[in-house]
Amino acid sequence: MHILILLLYILLLFTVVMLHVAYATYFERKIIGHMQVRMGPMEVGWHGLLQPIADGIKCFFKEDIIPENVDPLGFRLAPVVSLTAMVASLAVLPFAPGWVLADIDIGLLFVFAMSGLAGYGVILAGWASNSKFSFLGGLRSMAQVISYEIALGLSLVGVMLLSGSLNLSTIVEAQGGTFGGMYIFPQFIAFGVFFVAMLAETNRVPFDLPEAEAELVSGYSTEYSGMRYAIFFMAEYVGMLVMSSLGTICFFGGWSGPFAVPYFPALWFVLKVYAFMFVFIWIRATMPRYRYDQLMELGWKWLIPLALANIVLTAVCKALF
Amino acid sequence: MFIPIYFWYSAFVIVLCGILAISLRNPVHSVLAVLVLFFHMAGLYLLLQAEFLAAVQIIVYAGAILVLYLFVLFLVNLKEELKLSAFVPGVWLGRGIAAGLFVLLIWMLPSFTSGIKGNWPSAAVSQAGHTKALGGELFTTYLIPFEIAGLILLVALVGSLVLAARIEGEQSGRSGKRDQNEHPALPPHQEEVQP
């Protein structure tokens, strides 16, 4: 009986997240459209509201093309690995008090482990496609993920030190539910590092070198079409959701807000996550792409030393006061 | 009920992936087999309540070390396979020796005795939380060995940087200083993009 309820929760979470992914694309197209003084999708439904559904159906019924010289196992496996890894991280995210599938003690490490695994999807896609563009995209992604994962992990060590826990629910509770208790104030350096590393981890503009369309066609996903391509897309948007949630949990007090909302305690969490998503899209609409050596320089010479300095500073402050 | 099934499943997959990793012809497929192996090993750690170790196993081995292996595989040209002359004459002789070794190991198994019980049986670990237990022990009881291991790693890190810089400098006549600044994992074609 317990397992059945758990399965029901998993199904519910998965459905909600997939709907979110569909409408995040709509959200993105509308926002970028309005930022560029155009309307965005308008044709399907009122103000294009049914556009994501139409896109989904289109991708689902497209012919599944597998090019002749690909590595069949890797080519089929890559999108699945990407999506599975990202969706698995959802299990440990606390959306509201008690609204978490697996309240494990190493929640934060679990998210890191899964985001590291998601890199394999991209690398594998790049290699298995047997195409120059895909391969270059895969290589870039590999170097980028390794470099920025270090910065991402180190930036959150300060949060771990302050809260004394790796459990995401405990981290939220340790922030006390007040405005002044949010870790963004004592950990502002860490938040800066986290934010940049988060953009790089999710392969978003200005760090979208693995799929730089001006030079690599579409990078690692060049040879993919139809539903397999859509799965990569879903993985990217679930990744954005996971990273936004992680930022909300670790720096902005998670589910706590100015007043408790009856029936839907996750409201503040969702609002904060959507503010994050808006910034993601805002950056995409306004920033040019980094050059590759600049990307590496930023990661290794700025973010990692800054994150290390923040750890030392936090530890010293915690020991003194 | 569930735990023995899970153990035997993990053990089976670990052995299977180990065999696949050395027998597959495509090196990238071998790396993927090792990736699956690491995940099942993390699963075994979870059975022993060692959740921190399980997470670190995936983050460090799967997320970093194996990715670097892939990097090497991708950038080293493996068009022609390296053929080594066999160490033992005849395939079946080699297999016979391996099987004999296996039987010998199985035969030794009953003489295995578990060591004395420490302060941390798995019940105590799961009560205190594995991360807390491990951290406490590592930074109090085993502080000196921990620091020594850290120092050795640092020496290895500096040593590898020095070695890499010297070889680059001799080959292409560049100044060693610039090469030291570069990340060693950068693919070679990216080095040319320096401003």
Image (spheres, coloured by chain):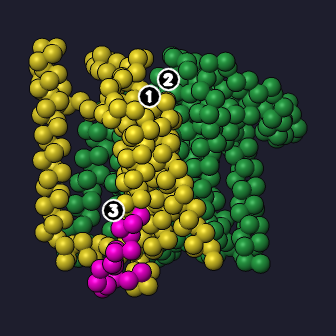
**Cβ atoms at labels 2 and 1 below 8 Å apart:** yes
In this view, the residue farthest toward the right is A45
Q: Chain B is which colour? A: yellow
Please give the letter of the chain rendered in green: A
Q: Is residue B70 above or below residue A190?
A: above
Residue range highlighted in magenta: B106-122
Is disc 3 in the same subunit as disc 2?
yes
- The residue singled out by tag 3 in the image is A158
Is residue A31 at all visible to an observer of this figure? no
**What amino acid type should be assigned to the residue bearing mark 2?**
Phe
Q: Quadrant of the N terminus of chain A?
A: bottom right
- The residue singled out by tag 1 in the image is A139
Earlier-in-chain disc, 3 versus 1: 1
Give residue A135's mark: 2
Q: Is residue A220 above or below residue B137?
A: above
**What amino acid type should be assigned to the residue bearing mark 3?**
Gly
**Cβ atoms at labels 3 and 1 below 8 Å apart:** no
Local crowd at mark 3 within 10 Å, few (<14), some, or many (≥20)? many
Is disc 2 in the same subunit as disc 1?
yes
Is disc 3 in the same subunit as disc 1?
yes
Q: Quadrant of the C terminus of chain A?
A: bottom left
Chain letter for mark 2, please: A
